[in-house]
Amino acid sequence: MKRYSTAALVAGALAIAGGAVRAQDSELVVFDWAGYEDPEFFAAFVETHGAPPTFAFFGDEEEAFQKLRSGFRADLAHPCSQSVPKWIEAGLLKPLDTSRITLWDDLDPSFRDIPAFQKDGEYYFVPVDWGNTGLTYNTELLSEEDVASLQAFADPKHAGRVSIGDSVDDAYALAFLATGVKDWTTATDEQFKAASDFLRKVHPNVRAYWSDGASLAQLMQSGEVYLAWAWNETFSTMSYEGHPIAMKRDTEEGASSWVCGYAILADAPGSEDKAYDFINAWLEPRSAEYIVANWGYGHSNAAAMAEMSQEDLAAVGLETSENLRAGTLWQAPVPAELREKMIAEFELIKAGF
């Protein structure tokens, strides 16, 4: 089985600072997370056009949003669900012609038809990849008892041995879950304060706020970090490489789930035909099989996912059950005012305030 290597992820992460990785097909520029330039995700595009698109990278969605607002131009971007309404309202996205998306009807409607992805009867977002953020730990250094609850992240005995993502959405997903909130779309001011207070308790324990799977894997492989709030990728990659790691979605408080995808940018300078070719390549069953087997993430093509072994899905942390669903905070879009408060408060927390 081919595995997307940690070395490749490191190379992708290092390319963030430099913007575009390598100019390939200049008629299509994709603004993306580091690592997603892997051509196995869009093999049909390369077969048709002879080269991959040109990629530029962002570290998080707020950075991407601000860069696009400042005039950076690309054709496609890869936001996640909670950011999409803000990008629509800012005029950054172009309505989709769903008749040009060949497998539109095969997409999981629970992702595809979220009202926040639509405006005036038109769709603006194609869900592609989904996964979980959950408690992930070194099984040689921590026991099941140590990680029964998300409160472990704030336990002073773990000072300097914890890592959570440098992502406002994942951080607050952890904090809301830990303080008893499963639906953050209706969070009150009091619940927001409690979640923020929890993150302030976690902060002294944090050795590093990870920005990509490669950096977190390095921290966990070295033993510097033994407890993390991490994506499926970390568990999938490290367990395949033989490291002592587990992902625990069934803590007392649960875990979180998210969906990301592609959107066509409103001022896209390149080829719209190639933008749709890229999306269609991503939605093919072979792309779904690749992301599950090699990254440990789910795919929005429900028809393709239904053909996969449930045992194989469980092996990469994609199993589902009523109990797991009941304990999941879905990272749905939150009201704009709350999201702006989350962004501002998280920056203060990371700075030690």
Image: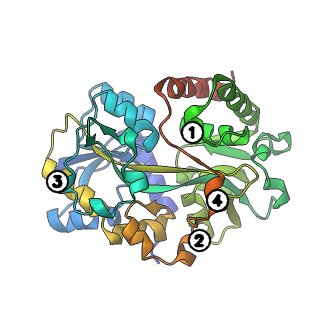
Label 3: which secondary element: helix
Few, some or many residues within 10 Å of mark 1 (<14, 14–19, 20+): some
Mark 2–mark 1 contact, CB under 8 Å?
Answer: no
Cα–Cα gap, marks 4 and 3? 39 Å
The amino acid beneath tag 1 is Asp
The amino acid beneath tag 2 is Ala
Query: Which quadrant of the view contains residue 177?
Result: top right
Q: Earlier in the sequence, mark 3 or mark 2?
A: 3
Residue at coordinates 22% horizontally, 52% vertically from top-left? 98
Q: x, y (%) of residue 211?
A: 54, 43
| Pointer 1 residue | 166
Few, some or many residues within 10 Å of mark 3 (<14, 14–19, 20+): some
| Pointer 4 residue | 324
The amino acid beneath tag 4 is Leu
Q: x, y (%) of residue 57?
A: 37, 43
Cα–Cα gap, marks 3 and 1? 32 Å
Coloration mode? rainbow
Query: Does 178 sit left or right of 158 as displayed?
Result: left
Q: x, y (%) of residue 235?
A: 61, 62
Q: Earlier in the sequence, mark 4 or mark 3?
A: 3
**Tag nearer the camera, 4 or 1:** 4
Could one spot residue 290 in this view of the protein? yes
Residue at coordinates 72% horizontally, 29% vertically from top-left? 194
| Pointer 3 residue | 274
The total number of labels drawn is 4
The amino acid beneath tag 3 is Lys
| Pointer 2 residue | 314
